[in-house]
Image (spheres, helix red, strand yellow):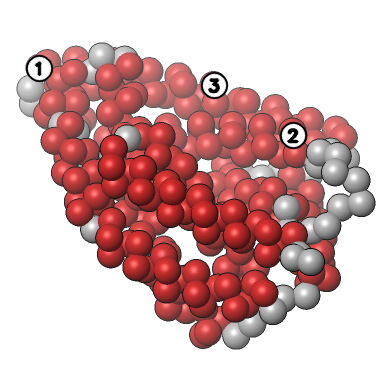
């Protein structure tokens, strides 16, 4: 009988190729989002395996997957900027600093290399598969217990916002790892709702951090163009207000965990 990890891994393989195929055909946001999620889940498995086996044996695999994920991340970041600017109608900033042509280029480039990514995925899966099938499920149970304790401990600390993104990644690792463990009852993870909501809130907060960083990198605030200055002042005010709102949401959720603890 397959272990929970083996079943989980098999589903990732299937979804990975399906999502890549969909994006290769359509270049749409949904298939890119789904592809990134599957890559994250596969990276989570590799991270777990790296705690058991010599990391050197997984080094090339990790590098290949990270490279594809970074390319997908560039598209995600550009989509995020486009959506936010379009939603709030900051057309001048969009056209001047973040033109849609940039996103179109990134999508076209990713689709062009999709056949190569497919070969990379095959190589990654071939290597990872051997480790997955050779791993005793007790090790996955021990890993989940450990990472669950880490998440609980961090959530009870008064974490500065500089550590929220790392906390989010750890929460995701914990959510994924729950699926690698055999459970006596198929009931839902009792802590899933809280942790998932928390990581979603941190994600929304972090999205605004990314937009602010892009504004700073492009030095939009230095523009001498009057229409850009007007757009930027409005955009920065909107960003700051939204950022504070998302920040409060995360702080409130973390304080709830403190009260529960």
Q: Position of residue 214 (x, y in %)?
A: 29, 39
Secondary structure state at the residue bearing disc 3: helix
- Answer with the quarter of the image where residue 47 lies: bottom right
One can see residue 72 in this view: yes
* 1 vs 2, front mark: 2
Q: Residue at x 61, y 61 (%)?
A: 9
Please give left or right for residue 208 compared with residue 54 in the image: left
- The reply to whether the C-beta atoms of the residues labelled 1 and 2 are less than 8 Å apart is no
- Placement of 159 over or under 112, stated as above or below: above
Alpha carbon distance from label 1 to label 3: 29 Å
- The reply to whether the C-beta atoms of the residues labelled 1 and 3 are less than 8 Å apart is no
Q: Position of residue 13 (x, y in %)?
A: 52, 58
Q: Residue at x 36, y 34 (%)?
A: 29
Please give left or right for residue 199 compared with residue 58 in the image: right
Q: Which residue is mark 3?
A: 245
Crowdedness near tag 2: few (<14), some (14–19) or many (≥20) residues, C-alpha within 10 Å: some
Q: Residue at x 42, y 78 (%)?
A: 60
Mark sitting earlier along the chain (1/3): 1
Q: Can you name the residue that lies furthest to the front here?
A: 1
Q: Position of residue 39 (x, y in %)?
A: 48, 55
Q: Point out the image quarter for the N terminus.
A: bottom right
Secondary structure state at the residue bearing disc 1: helix
Mark sitting earlier along the chain (1/2): 2
Q: Point out the image quarter for the C terminus.
A: top right
Alpha carbon distance from label 1 to label 2: 46 Å
Instruction: Judge by depth and name the residue closer to the eye, 253 or 6.
Output: 6
Secondary structure state at the residue bearing disc 2: helix
Q: Which residue is mark 1?
A: 226
- Answer with the quarter of the image where residue 223 lies: top left
* 3 vs 2, front mark: 2
Instruction: Judge by depth and name the residue closer to the eye, 229 or 249.
Output: 249
């Amino acid at each position: 009988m397959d272990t929970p990890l083996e079943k989980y891994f098999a589903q990732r393989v299937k979804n990975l190729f399906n999502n890549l195929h969909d994006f290769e055909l359509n270049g749409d946001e949904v298939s890119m989002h789904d592809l990134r999620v599957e890559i994250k889940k596969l990276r989570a498995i590799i991270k777990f395996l790296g705690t058991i086996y010599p990391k050197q044996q997984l080094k090339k695999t990790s590098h290949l997957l990270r490279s594809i994920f970074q390319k997908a991340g560039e598209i995600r970041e550009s989509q995020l900027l486009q959506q936010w600017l379009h939603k709030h109608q900051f057309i001048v900033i969009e056209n001047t600093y973040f033109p849609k042509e940039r996103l179109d280029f990134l999508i076209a480039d990713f689709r062009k290399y999709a056949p190569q990514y497919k070969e990379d995925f095959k190589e990654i899966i071939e290597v990872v598969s051997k480790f997955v099938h050779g791993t005793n499920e007790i090790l996955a149970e021990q890993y989940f217990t450990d990472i669950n304790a880490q998440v609980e401990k961090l959530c009870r600390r008064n974490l500065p916002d500089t550590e929220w993104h790392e906390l989010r990644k750890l929460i995701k690792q914990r959510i994924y790892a729950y699926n690698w463990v055999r459970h006596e009852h198929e009931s839902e993870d009792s802590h899933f709702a809280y942790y998932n909501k928390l990581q979603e809130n941190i994600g929304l907060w972090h999205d605004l951090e990314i937009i602010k960083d892009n504004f700073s990198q492009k030095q939009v605030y230095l523009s001498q163009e009057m229409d850009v200055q007007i757009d930027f002042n409005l955009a920065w005010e909107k960003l700051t207000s939204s950022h504070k709102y998302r920040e409060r949401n995360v702080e409130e959720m973390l304080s709830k965990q403190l009260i529960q603890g």
